Amino acid sequence: MIKALITYRLLALLVAVCLLISGCSVNPVTGEQEISWIDEEWERKTGQQFFGVQQQAGGGLYKNDPDLSLYVQSVGQRIVPHSRRSTLPYEFVVLNDSTPNAWALPGGKIAVNRGLLLALTNEAELAAVLAHEIVHADARHSAQSQELGSIISLGQVLASELLSNAGYSHQAIQQGIAYGGLLGQTRYGRSRELEADLYGMKYMSAAGYDPSAAVSLQKTFVALSKDSKSNSFSRLFASHPPSQERVNTNQRTSKNLPRSGELGEQRYHQELLQLQKIQPAFVFSDQAKVAISDKKYRQAIKLADQAIAIAPSESEFYEVKGAAQIKLDRPSEALASLNKAVALNNHYYSPILRRGMLQFDLKAFTLAEKDLLASVKLAPSQIAFLTLADIAQQRDNCPAAKRYYRQALNASQHNRASINQRLSELNQRC
């Protein structure tokens, strides 16, 4: 009976794998046959669903210079008509993050960090970045990852069943599966990056940009990855690993494309003037964050004040100052700083959440609840839901507390045992 059950389970897994692999279509960018069962509607819905939350996770929108965001959008929209799926709902945003990075979600949702804009030297390099990300959306790379992940997951389960029946140890099975999955995903990632480089250069060239900018861009990234300061580029290099192979490949591609396109150096410099002007303020702010992590709170406040003196309209600097003031047990000063941060940008969850947590510590539960609920509408966070559960218990509102604990479990994989324990104790009490 047990043997028959195992055989049936293996057969079911094999059928599932075969069904997944059997779905094929033509890639809209490369024209090649590929495994495909996720449709464009999934891409559009997924991109739309996660774009806002991903922006929140990436520092929120950069609001200090609205014209800069419009400029980046204009460069992106100049390239879109030359993509294979130009009807996708492409959006381009600038995020308030010093890390030099860019990313794309399915359906054409693309973000560029403030820090990456400062690392570029001309508009054509910006076009190279955006065209690369457009290809990721255009060529269904996110959908491909989802499809590959499904196949790998089923394959891992199938391999586990087969190896278990063959007498291999559980530890050996898990190690083999982990390494095999990682190897497959790594190779797939490299091929997608080269594909995005190739077609991205074609797109930017068709839009009137000099494709050699994609070469200079990769040369810069390779140099930075070897430099002692490359830690600041770790996120970019993790998702877009530079290599001499990419430089060489881009050089070969560039030779086969028109070189009459523009670089746009002067225009790019003009559009970046304001950001470059206040960049020292963000340096002070980043140093203040490090000082807070090193428990040098008074130094952090001084650095935040230096940042504020340069750019008094930037919300981030007041939040950093407020965070340091909280650590020094100066709640009234911290509240004033956080009020200013929220007033300057009430579309970013972090200062709202921080103020809500401070209000909770001050036992101003109604004000805390208002802020925490506002923060989770922008970005659901486990700490916010847990604090809301605490407020609900303060009011003997068991149904609300249980609901918030369940939402805390959904918000993150962390602390699940502890939260389940609290939920279990609450169920026993009421």
Image: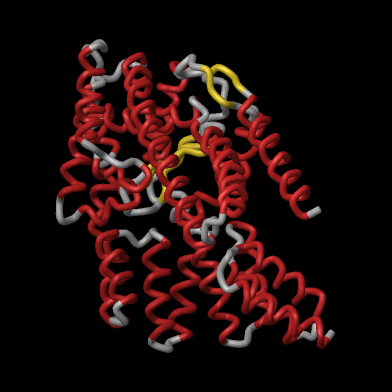
What scheme was used to colour the molecule?
secondary structure
- Residue 273: name its quadrant: top left
Identity of the residue drawn at 76% across and 44% down = 8
Considering the image in quadrants, where does the C terminus appear? bottom right
Residue in the picture at 72% in, 45% down = 7
- In this rendering, the answer to whether 346 lies above or below 303 is above
Residue 77 relative to residue 259: left or right: right
Picture layout, residue 189 above or below residue 275: above
Q: Position of residue 213 (x, y in %)?
A: 23, 27
- Kindly tell me whether residue 12 is visible in this rendering: yes
Q: Is 86 in front, or is 30?
A: 30
| Near-viewer residue (340 or 403) | 403
Residue 180, percent across and down?
A: 45, 46
- At 25% from the left and 29% from the top, the residue drawn is 267
Q: Is residue 22 left or right of residue 240?
A: right
Query: As drawn, which residue projects farthest toward the right?
Result: 430
On the picture, is 217 further left or further right than 405?
left
User: Within the image, what quadrant is residue 17 found in?
Assistant: top right
Residue 62 seen in this snapshot: no
Q: On the rendered structure, is 27 left or right of 417? A: left
How many discs mark residues in the rendered view?
0
Q: Residue at x 26, y 21 (%)?
A: 211
Comparing 374 with 255, the one in front is: 255
Q: Residue 172 location in percent, x, y?
A: 47, 58
Q: Is residue 338 above or below residue 344?
A: below
What x and y, as percent, mark residue 265? Answer: 21, 29
